[in-house]
Image (tube, coloured by chain):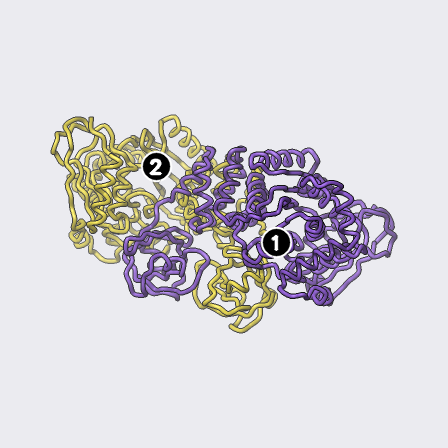
Chain colours: A purple, B yellow
Amino acid sequence: MKLKVKNFNWYAGHPVVILTDKTAKEMNVFVDDRIAITASNKKIYAVVDIFSKLVKNKEIGISHELNRVLKVKTGDKVEVTVSETSDASFLIKKKIKGESLSQKELEIIISEIVHNNLTNSEIAFFTAAEKLNGMNFEEIISLTKAMVKTGARLKFKGKYTANKHCIGGVAGNRTTPITVAICASVGLTLPKTSSRAITSASGTADVIETISNVELPLKKIIKIVNNKKACLAWGGSLGLAPSDDKIIQVERLLNLDIESQLLASVMSKKIATGAKHILIDIPYGHGSKIEDLKNAKSLGRKFYKIAKRFNLKMKVVYTDGTQPIGDGFGPVLEMIDIIKVFKSEGPEDLKEKSIYLAAELIKLCRIKNAKTKARDALESGKAYEKFKEIVNAQNGKNNFDKKIKELKLAKFKKIIPAKKSGRITKISNKGANSLCRILGTPETISAGVYLHKHLEKIKKGEPLLTLYTESKVKMKDALKFLEEFKPIKIR
Amino acid sequence: MKLKVKNFNWYAGHPVVILTDKTAKEMNVFVDDRIAITASNKKIYAVVDIFSKLVKNKEIGISHELNRVLKVKTGDKVEVTVSETSDASFLIKKKIKGESLSQKELEIIISEIVHNNLTNSEIAFFTAAEKLNGMNFEEIISLTKAMVKTGARLKFKGKYTANKHCIGGVAGNRTTPITVAICASVGLTLPKTSSRAITSASGTADVIETISNVELPLKKIIKIVNNKKACLAWGGSLGLAPSDDKIIQVERLLNLDIESQLLASVMSKKIATGAKHILIDIPYGHGSKIEDLKNAKSLGRKFYKIAKRFNLKMKVVYTDGTQPIGDGFGPVLEMIDIIKVFKSEGPEDLKEKSIYLAAELIKLCRIKNAKTKARDALESGKAYEKFKEIVNAQNGKNNFDKKIKELKLAKFKKIIPAKKSGRITKISNKGANSLCRILGTPETISAGVYLHKHLEKIKKGEPLLTLYTESKVKMKDALKFLEEFKPIKIR
């Protein structure tokens, strides 16, 4: 069908065309269908969106992504056809049928995802097939390679280019800024990128952002790492393994845990940062993502196996995931914990775990006396200085002290006392996260939960929790949640 | 987050909000994410779309579907939060984990699909789980019930309310208009709804539409069936088992064949039309959807089992699916075949199959001498009169003859002769369909393929095919396709 172009000079984020309801009906296409547009010997695929008020019948609204390629003017006629199933869709179908995919085939799928040529539904089919039919080891390797190949890849000169990753599931547990600062202060190169919260109270990027710019262009990141040995940036805008972000966006609709995708995602991101030494933290135990040590070790072995294939040094540590780590949960509260640890005033559990992880990573780089070096770096204030340096570099000015002073907790505050005396036997990670989300995190950075006691004895009336929020309604909702779900048990 | 409403007084087809890229980033939401909007004690869910030019930062564009519920004015402030996983998503995840779903649970999913509260990705996850984990018999029954319950349901007075369905896969094979006319002319009530083409050269609705209005409101359909005993309408706008259309829209991205979905889809649509006697045609054999009789019968047994549970009389016939049926493929070409059959001038295979199907359905209604009655109805011209009546009723005027005269084939025509003498051993159904699509069907109703010979002897130089198209470029593409894929084999 011939349609008249209407150029929309905006970036829709992916190649999209706008049709009226009537034109779409005539072409027998629906929202999210793929069509092919042909103009001056160029053919390009796009996804259909229907907004009858934006275009006339027989008109096709074209996003900037498309016009960059087609170079057509408003009023030009283009040939539009319903697109046959693409190569990538064919391959996804193959995976659904239970067959395994080759390196080449996975590259096609991942490349089509990166170029926005697959609809979210097709990505959903791909991840569902991964989940239900599984991926063999060679497929995971191929997927990892494809994910690295379709994005930017960093390279640093330092001998000890390292990185760390925690598979998550534990409330608080904000070791990254501390561990990174310790490692950088003893000479490791650590270009750390982190994500924002998906289902938790806050992500590392959300926490760092309370005092620091985290959205930096790739060039700047490279410069900072070359000068300061480390960064603490948000990974989302850097284009490292960019397919991952799109897959996660679809996956998180159902919070699916897909092991092959997790492995390829973690490994591709670390490889893309140029890491040669990688530490993986797998918290396990009742109430965390991995139920027991056996399952944690099974996952760990897979990480080791992949690392071997990519010639990387790896250490997997299995840590206690049964209760939250640190006292504060929520962006500002977690940053306060971190600063306290740097000043040796802080929660002991967060401090000790951060030192432990740093020591393991330093040891992996074959630097001697790793444990002593890690502890000294933190307790001497050397790591804190390094942390300040990184934040100031990311902010482009020396405003660290000012930023710390400006940290502010939410205006509504409520202390929840223990209802009885006894021993705290359970603090649910999921419960703590949900409570924070109800109070407004991660959007409201000043909101969250402060935990006065961990798994220990408590007396009736002693403070158990303090809730922080900017909204009275949210406080009410949070109290209701506490009442209904009892995320903390005292016996 | 509080956002300022901007009312878009259009129906987007589903509850959608428009945000700027910046606002979306601040909220940490992406295209297709679900959010919750709260205003004056009402909470409603919507899906995010990002168009930075349509709204300002901190503004939320609201489709008419949402405003009907929220009743807010442009400029009002609403509270917008990222939506937690809905009940339906939780249930989809349950199915992905391999658990089976109850009647109640499937009703929740199907109802959410009908109300547009699930994203296409979530529907993709649901169908992938159906495909990969399978559905047990009770789940298929529940799914069928849920699909009927969430749509309109017809009821007719006649004793012999019947319907037919062919699972497809054979090129041409346009028996429906003939079979329906025969059955209605001997007293059956047959409110037939059909689909448009999905992957074939044309659907029954496309063929009927060459001479008749097929998009009719439900009330009119009921009136026509009450007066004329039958209709030949497009099912898409009637709201019978409406979840099906949405599921098909997602499924067809990969052309997945999902047996449980096929069974529930066919049965729910037939039940919704009020049918008590149902004929299912399963073509089988190399080159059709079902490879052999064993698999055809296995599917047939499932249809019988479901029919029994719903207290319906059913007959499943297993027919030859190894080659196309009829001579013309493409909307106009198929209508010409149909008219020829009614006038006893037509392709014998199409005529005999139509009589056979009609006789089986008449027999199922326990009317005596079904075979003779069916043949007589067709050969006496009684069925043709009935067909004219139905078309005139659907058009709202007696213009049948005029419409038939106006049928016109495409302006470019090319006869393809046999390259050698011998026996035609294969005519690929898929090949015939692809060839038609390349020539422009179903959009170009005058395009298509005329088959001069079926599986029989042919001499070198005798006409094998005639191609019809409105575009020289398409003719070239079609010739290239013929050369490359050789859909017809002579030995």
Q: In the rendered view of the protein, which quadrant contains the C terminus of chain A?
A: top right
Q: Amino acid at mark 1?
A: Val
Q: Amino acid at mark 2?
A: Cys
The disc numbered 1 marks a residue on which chain? A
Q: Is residue B414 left or right of residue A192?
A: left
Q: Secondary structure at mark 2?
A: loop
The alpha-carbon separation of the residues under discs 2 and 1 comes to 81 Å
Residue B462: x, y in percent? Answer: 12, 34
Image height of B469 relative to A407, above or below: above
- Most distant residue in the bottom direction: B75
Q: Residue at x 50, y 37 (%)?
A: A142
Name which quarter of the figure residue B425 lies in: top left
Q: Is residue A87 left or right of residue B135?
A: left
Name which quarter of the figure residue A401 lies in: bottom right
Q: Is residue A436 left or right of residue A148?
A: right
Does the image show residue B72?
yes
Disc 1: which residue:
A225
Does the image show residue B104?
no
Name which quarter of the figure residue B200 lies in: top left
Residue B315: x, y in percent? Answer: 37, 33
Q: Secondary structure at mark 1?
A: helix
Image height of A387 relative to A271, above or below: below
Disc 2: which residue:
B365
Q: Residue at x 33, y 50 (%)?
A: A82
